[in-house]
Amino acid sequence: MKWRAILIAVLVCAALAGLVIWLQHARLMGHWLQVHTGTVNEPGPYYGFWSGFGSDLAEFSILGAIGTGVYQLIKKYNCHEPGCWRIGNHPAAGGQFLLCYRHHPDYRGKKPTHELIERLHRQHLEHEAALHSRLQEIQQRLDADRKEAPGDVVPGQTADGVTTPPRREG
Ligand SMILES: [Zn+2]
């Protein structure tokens, strides 16, 4: 009991001594904190850094992000011909490439004229019509094959497209 009382007394004394020292140097400690958080003493050792180069650190990252975004945008809409800086808004090869009028093979280095647009449009329609008729041809052939072999009806569907429950024979 005696030793414990002494220990407590020593700890209290130490705490008091620490408090006194801290109070005596409070101004100094507070000042240190203020300088290092940048709230006081503006012309201090870090002022030059944080108001000069240091203040640009955040801006560098913002500029970097903007730069990357612009680069990606340019990469996306820039003509795919190597070394060309025009905007490529004419798809070629089924949209694989975006080319400017000068590099698109259909335009032959010139801006598309009204006649060219009309001709290409007509070609496109003819192509579509040819594709459609070919598909119809295939469909008709398939239908004919189905009629020849009525047992091979796809479950749930008949040759005329009417949906019926699967037929089970035998
Ligand atoms: Zn180009």
Image (cartoon, rainbow, N blue to C red):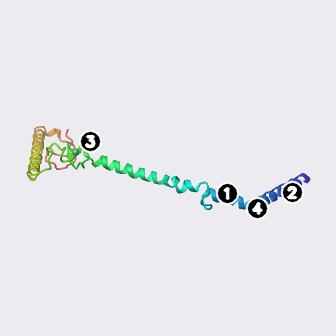
Q: Nearer the viewer, mark 2 or mark 3?
A: 3
Identify the residue shown where x is 31% and y is 46%: 75
In this view, the residue in front, 10 or 42, is: 42
Q: Give the residue pinned by disc 2.
A: 9
Of the numbered discs in the image, which one, if any, rests on residue 137?
A: none
Mark in the foreground, 2 or 4: 4
Q: Amino acid at mark 2?
A: Ala
| For marks 3 and 4 on the same chain, the one whose residue lies earlier in the sequence | 4
Kind of element beneath mark 4: helix
Residue 123 seen anywhere in this rendered image of the structure: yes
Q: Does residue 27 sit above or below 61 in this rendering?
A: below
Residue under numbered circle 4: 23
Q: In the image, is the residue at mark 3 within 8 Å of ligand 1 by its beta carbon?
A: no
Q: Amino acid at mark 4?
A: Leu
Q: Position of residue 142 (x, y in %)?
A: 13, 40
Question: What percent of the width, then of the height, locates residue 42?
Answer: 60, 60
Q: Which comes sooner in the sequence, label 1 or label 2?
A: 2
Marks 3 and 1 sit apart, C-alpha to C-alpha, by: 58 Å
Q: Residue at x 26, y 41 (%)?
A: 83
> The C terminus appears in which quarter of the rendering?
top left
Could you say which is closer to the camera, residue 87 or residue 156?
87
Contact (Cβ within 8 Å) of mark 2 with mark 3: no
In front of the other: label 1 or label 4? 1
Task: Please name the amino acid that badge 3 sits on.
Answer: Gly
Mark 3 and mark 1 lie on one chain; the one further toward the N terminus is 1
N-term-proximal mark, 2 vs 4: 2
Question: Which quadrant of the picture is home to ligand 1?
Answer: top left
Q: Residue at x 70, y 58 (%)?
A: 29
Q: Which residue is mark 1?
A: 32
